[in-house]
Image (tube, rainbow, N blue to C red):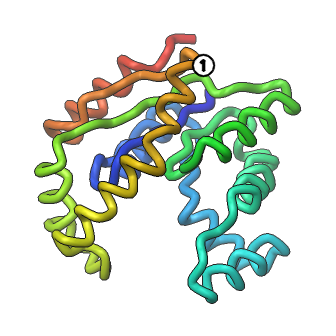
């Protein structure tokens, strides 16, 4: 099972991806963790990503796709995985689909969590991670960037027939149950 969990900042992607992965016995692949691991392990891609991040730039789409490809080649991912934080652009989605096609695989479901902006803002302000971009003004900017740059990925997967919209409001367990209901039965 290959699942993409998607949504704006504060939608609960990481929390839910961990729960779903544990429930289904698959791996949770967070691109943020993937970047940190590649850098810490000193892989060629990790060195490249570190140099890009150190310069304050965004990691190019193909580099992100290459890192995902390197990661999912690991035996741990053979039974499936849930992606959190990838793909972030239509270009990444197309490249990922091409990668999967070469492997004889495909995405099983694209789950988009949604919640009102005011709730997302409150979640991010109260999550206590101390991130420098967790101020109300910066959160609003991040939500706008998401809507303009990342949300088109939803349209891509809607056209492919894999899209499932899930209400991201309520308790963690309520949202989890909605997500499980959206996953195709095998």
Q: Is residue 28 left or right of residue 116?
A: right
Q: Is residue 85 above or below residue 90?
A: below
Residue 58 image offset from top left, x and y in percent: 59, 71
Q: Quadrant of residue 27?
A: top right
Q: Is residue 108 left or right of residue 117?
A: right
Estimate how packed mark 1 is, as few (under 14), some (14 to 19) or many (20 or more) residues with alpha carbons within 10 Å: few
Residue beneath disc 1: 160
Which residue, as the protein is rendered here, is positioned at the far bottom? 54
Q: Is residue 144 above or below residue 60?
A: above
Residue at horizontal 76 percent and vertical 56 percent from the top: 62
Q: Quadrant of residue 31?
A: bottom right
Q: Secondary structure at mark 1?
A: loop
Residue 104 image offset from top left, x and y in percent: 84, 25
Residue at horizontal 78 percent and vertical 56 percent from the top: 66
Residue at horizontal 58 percent and vertical 51 percent from the top: 29
* Image quarter in which the N terminus is found: top right
């Amino acid at each position: 099972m290959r699942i993409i969990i998607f949504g704006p900042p504060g939608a609960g992607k990481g929390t839910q991806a961990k729960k779903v992965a544990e429930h289904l016995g698959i791996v949770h692949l967070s691109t943020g963790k993937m970047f940190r691991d590649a850098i810490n392990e000193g892989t060629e891609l990790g060195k490249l990503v570190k140099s890009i991040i150190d310069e304050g730039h965004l990691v190019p789409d193909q580099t992100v796709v290459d890192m995902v490809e390197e990661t999912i080649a690991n035996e741990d991912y053979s039974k499936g995985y849930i992606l959190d934080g990838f793909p972030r652009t239509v270009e990444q989605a197309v490249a990922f689909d091409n990668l999967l096609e070469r492997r004889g695989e495909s995405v099983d479901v694209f789950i988009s969590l949604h919640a009102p902006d005011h709730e997302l803002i409150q979640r991010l302000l109260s999550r206590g991670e101390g991130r420098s971009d967790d101020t109300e003004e910066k959160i609003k900017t991040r939500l706008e960037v998401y809507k303009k740059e990342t949300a088109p990925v939803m349209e891509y997967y809607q056209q492919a027939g894999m899209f499932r919209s899930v209400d991201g409001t309520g308790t963690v367990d309520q949202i989890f149950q909605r997500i499980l209901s959206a996953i195709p039965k095998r």
